[in-house]
Image (cartoon, rainbow, N blue to C red):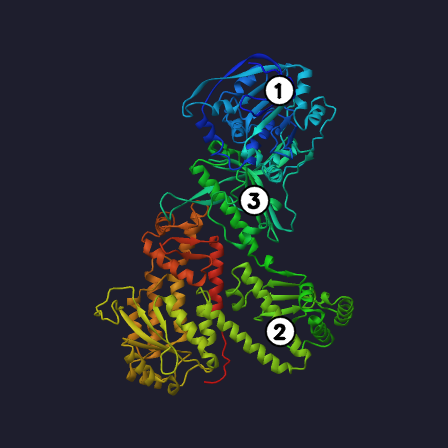
Amino acid sequence: MAHDAGDQVTSADDGSSVIAAEAVGESAGEISVEISTRFLEHFSEQLYSSPQKAFEELISNGWDAGATFVDVFVPDDLASPTAALTVFDNGASMDEDGLRTLWKIAFSPKEKQQFQYGRRVVGKFGIGKLSTYVLGNKLTYICKAADGVIRRVTMDYGAIDKSENPDKLVSELNLEMFELSEDELEEALASVENGPELKKLITKEVVPEVDEIDVPDEFGSPQTALETSSSDSWTLVVLSGLKRSGRNLQTGILRRMLEAALPMSSELTIRLNGDVLQSSKVDATVIRSWKIGEELGFKSFEVAGPIEGETETITFKTESEEENEVSYTFVDIPEIGKVSGTITLYEDKISGGKSEEIGFSNGFLVNVLGRVVNQDDPQFGADNHSHASWARFRMAVRADGLNHHLVTNREQFKSSRELKVFRAFLRRCFNLTRSVYDSDANAEMPDGGDVLVKSLGVVSLAPLRSAVSEALRTQPQLPGLFDDSGITDREESRKNWRENTSDNIKNALESVKYETFKDDEFVKFRLSDSTIVVNKKHPFVAEHSRTKAEKELMRTVAMVNFLTDVYALETGVDPSKLDNVRQYRDRLMRFRAIQRRQSGTHIAQILLQKQHKSGVFKEMEAVLADALRYIGFSVETKGGSGEPEGVASAKLFATSRKPTDAEPEPPLYKFTYDAKSSKHDAAKTGNLSLDGIKEHKKRYDADYALVVAPGFQDGAAATRCEQQGVTPIKASDLGRLLEFTVKHGAIPLDRLEGLFKLHDPDKVTEWIDALQDELTSSRKLTLDVFLKALEQLRGKVPDVLDAGTISFTCRETLNAKSVTDSDVLNLVRGVSILVPDLVGLTEDQKIVVNAAPNRVADAVKSQLEELHGQDETEGDGD
């Protein structure tokens, strides 16, 4: 029935206020609606996370209607009985048929319509309007369609709430449709607080300026070819009789939500309480950014399989297109479709603080059909990203293909394989930024002098200024402290140095960088560009620079070491004594690197280096333990007065030894080991302490005893070792066993037992020669064939491989007919000793390959050349 408009505000039967916007007009028919209270509760209170989110649905309707402008008004006093929220848009509106279709619950004519007015359609469920149930009692649509008629329909949610049985389908709810005159429209506008401004918009007394952009936004989406209506159509939505949730709506939160969730504002100007909203941006220094496409540098990613431990490789295409005269790039992922956007890594954290102040900043911003769908979940349902780069990471990604997997509130997704694939792609993109964040370049310290001056005071760089000036005047007082390459005119360079640093002392130090040296120094000061350079190849640096945090600490350690040395020179410390201190410090750092070593990359090399340095015997002990471990023995280090360096056991095979309480799982055999370094080619027999080694063997109930030295005196050593039952082996021969493991795969420990039955070092050498011949002739799989197999499989299978895949390739493609899975595994164990960062073996016997086969080959070759290139014979005593 029609209401008598009368005054602008009247009273309903239940005592609530009725504004003119809900009452004006002449009846023009009825719209039948079937709905229940329980349905409304489910699709409003349960599905929309906040009143702001529910209100957003009204704004999205303007996008689907092809509007270029949406005006939103939220009154200051939401507790007022006449308070009303309004949303106005200038898009194509609804005539009589359109209004009838609007109130067909859970039906939407846009469900199968991908484009409308040149835009991707957001709505598809036909229930977005019901989100307003949680906000107010009455929802009024006043529309002027292309036919020029002004119509009004008001949904009174209160009438549904009065239903005797909320579970019963209410089928007799009729919404009356009214037609309005211009005077009645003016009366309706006057009943809402922002009515005068709405009148100016409707009469076009005020024409909002729509921002135009020429480039894609951060989501990489091309601008749509909007097909605007030539008519004066518009839609005004009035939400009144506000409920508690509606009265709790916060304008500030709504503003930030719309700025972040509706990046389509570049094509749709949104005004909130008179202020034009801008898409949310982050104002911070950028380390690096990528457009999703070729710039990613990868074209595949891994997805976890249905069985734990299994993975599947998803390969995608990278493409670019031009749409509406704007070029943009994207990737085409199977099962997902086009995915575009940008990835940005910032120098400082963009997370943290109060969300009311900063809004949604870091994490994944997933845009589907023009709106961000995961505002409350920047992880996008993935596991927590605890890496330091996460707080500096922002990925704005548009994936319209996910629209099919959205549930009714357009904030949640159905569990599906496609969603799993998309999350794996996001994770791969995040890992890309992690690697950059942890890279050497990002760990550099730019403006190092400025940092020091601010933190330590001007005096901190005065010794550096003096030392560089002196080094340029003559020659550096300490070898290895300065790098004077590129200096042609020392006097001119000295003059420029003094002038620059006298004007501003912080000019004395430009930056701290990571580079590779030709020599073994830890840190140097490069005179040509005033840079402290850290040697990436130094063992201490290599072992303590795996993450950005470690590199930052290493940068500081190097800078402190260098500046301390400079300060020592400035205070008068004798350069030769300081050089001894620097050498001692370097040995300590190298020894620490050995202790921390997490790979076998340089074990054989270091073994040969340390055999002639008896003054640092602890280093020899440590590297010997590592060598035995990588050959395959279980090692328990001992050391100390009266103790062997350690006890090693062969535990991988069946044994005839009887279990005891002390040793419930006895090995096939075990042996004690000791290391003897010497500056000479051969250790003196008297210095081998063979009596003590024999006693060690007895005390630990070992089957054998091993002593390692650079060499042994002819005759005497063999006789004494025979008497005491000790096996002597040259460090170079032990290094050969490591080399065999790399070239031919792991050597069975029962085969190695024959070595321990020999007591003549020459016989041991002959035994190892024979083993080499045997391995060369009998091993079915060579490193060359293995690498060729990797090349055959490159790009066809994931980087994590089964041994069977490689062995099959060797047999079928490379004609290595007798290669088995165990042959492959043995060889991989060997290769991983030298290049563990490139090839490795997981606990479940999966082979990990992190580089192209030619790079693996080059790395192995380089390590073996370094192993054979060692010729250090200097020592400090026998």
Q: Which residue is mark 2?
A: 480
* C-alpha distance separating marks 3 and 2: 45 Å
- Disc 2 is placed on an element classified as loop
Q: Which residue is mark 3?
A: 395
Nearer the observer, disc 1 or disc 3? 1
Mark identifier at residue 533: none
Residue 520 horizontal/vertical position (percent)? 56, 71
Q: Residue at x 71, y 29 (%)?
A: 208
3 or 2: mark nearer the eye: 3
Is residue 605 visible from the viewing direction of this image?
A: no
From the image, state whether disc 2 or disc 1 is nearer to you: 1
* Circle 1: element type: strand
Using the image as rendered, state which of residue 197 and residue 548 is in the foreground.
197
Q: CA distance from mark 1 to mark 3?
A: 39 Å
Q: Which residue is mark 1?
A: 143
783 over 174 or under it: above or below = below
Residue kind at label 3, given as amino acid type? Met
Cα distance, mark 2 to mark 1?
82 Å
Examine the image and state in which quarter residue 722 appears: bottom left
Q: Are marks 3 and 2 in contact (CB under 8 Å)?
A: no
Question: Does 814 sit above or below residue 251?
Answer: below
Return the residue nearer the eye: 605 or 543: 543
